[in-house]
Amino acid sequence: MCLAGRATLDLAELAAEPWVLGCLKTEAYLRRHAERAGFEPDVRGTTTDYFFARSLVAGAGVGISLIPSIPLTPELPGLSTVPIKPPAPARHLGVAAIRRDDRPHVTTLIHALREQARRAGR
């Protein structure tokens, strides 16, 4: 099945694909959402590093992987990304900071996170 050119994918369409796991938290998301989609993932590789997982997918062709958007930068030759259709696994981030006017880096981080969330449609 050619997945690379698709705009989005339903997780159930990936039931027969071999998987590479990039971290324990992503494994939990994948297993929970795969169960809802009616399958158990065929895991062929496991790592605790998203960048190594990307290499196993793009370079070694071990399988496909569920990776959050942030570690997909920079692009890796031979790697295509396709979002999962809702209901898709999602992470929720929060920021806690001491309120001070002299911390522009905190303000910059909060604005960047809000912009990323806006782009992702959340």
Image (tube, rainbow, N blue to C red):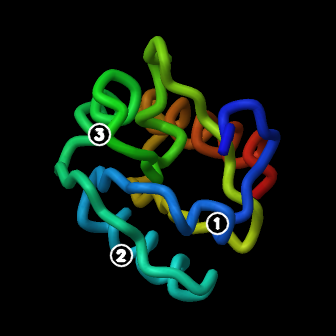
Residue lying at 59% horizontally and 61% vertically, measured from the top left: 14
Residue at 68 percent of width and 38 percent of height: 2
Tell me residue 111's x, y (percent): 63, 37
Q: Label for residue 53?
A: 3
Q: Which mark is residue 28?
A: 2
Q: Residues within 10 Å of mark 2 (few under 14, many from 20)?
A: few
* Residue drawn at x 73%, y 54% as measured from the top left: 9
Give me the C-alpha separation between circle 3 and circle 2: 16 Å
* Rendered view: 88 above or below 6: below
Find residue 37 and report its image quarter.
Answer: bottom right
Of residues 115 and 75, the one drawn nearer to the viewer in this rendering: 75
> How many other residues sit within 10 Å of disc 1, few (<14), some (14-19) or many (≥20)?
many
Numbered badge on residue 11: 1
**How far apart are labels 1 and 3 at the CA level?**
19 Å
Identity of the residue furthest to the top in this view: 77
Tell us which disc is closer to us: 1 or 2.
Answer: 1
- Is 103 situated left or right of 24 in this image? right
Q: Amino acid at mark 3?
A: Ala
Q: Is residue 80 above or below residue 11?
A: above
